Image: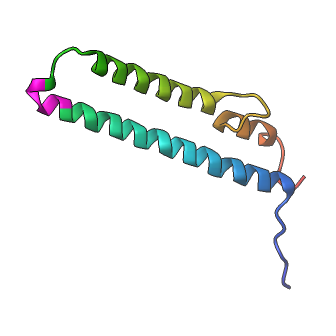
């Protein structure tokens, strides 16, 4: 008995969303790593360990970027591709409908 598994439209949409969400979260993790690598460089170099407009800018920019990324993932709107929104339609439903 050979049955071909046919993905429902809902499952196909959910899988596309998961790929997008995965890529966005992975990007945020890479950006976090890069930010802290720059902080390590600053800590290792006493000549640049002083308050500066650039250091403040770097910190504020990273914080804004990270918060925007988190906000995208917790956005519950039905048309938003986010981690939270991806679970609402399926919490009491199957992918086959």
Taking 3 as reference, is 29 above or below it? above
Q: Quadrant of residue 71?
A: top right
Query: In the image, what residue occupies the spot 67% across and 27% down?
Result: 75
Front position in the image: 10 or 47? 47
Q: Is residue 6 above or below residue 31?
A: below
Q: Is residue 33 left or right of residue 15?
A: left
Q: Quadrant of residue 81?
A: top right
**Front residue of this view, candidates 34 and 81:** 34
Q: Nearer the viewer, residue 51 or 91?
A: 51
Q: How many marks?
A: 0
The picture places residue 3, in percent across and down from the top left corner, at 85, 78
Quarter of the image where the N terminus is located: bottom right
Is residue 43 a member of the stretch shown in magenta? yes
Tell me which secondary structure the magenta stretch mostly adopts. Answer: helix
Residue most toward the right? 97
Judge from the rendering whether residue 45 lies leftward or rightward of residue 19; answer left or right.
left
**Which residue is rendered at x = 15% and y = 22% of the image?**
49
Which stretch did the figure color magenta?
42-47
Q: Is residue 41 left or right of residue 90?
A: left
Magenta span has 60? Answer: no
Q: Residue furthest bottom?
A: 1
């Amino acid at each position: 008995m050979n049955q071909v598994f046919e993905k429902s439209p809902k499952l196909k949409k959910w899988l596309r969303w998961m790929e997008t969400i995965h890529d966005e979260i992975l990007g945020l993790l890479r950006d976090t790593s890069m930010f802290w690598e720059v902080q390590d460089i600053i800590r290792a170099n006493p000549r640049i360990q002083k308050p500066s407009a650039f250091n403040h800018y770097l910190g504020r920019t990273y914080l804004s970027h990270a918060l925007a990324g988190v906000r995208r993932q917790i956005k519950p709107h039905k048309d938003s591709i986010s981690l939270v929104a991806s679970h609402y339609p399926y919490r009491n439903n199957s992918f086959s409908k």
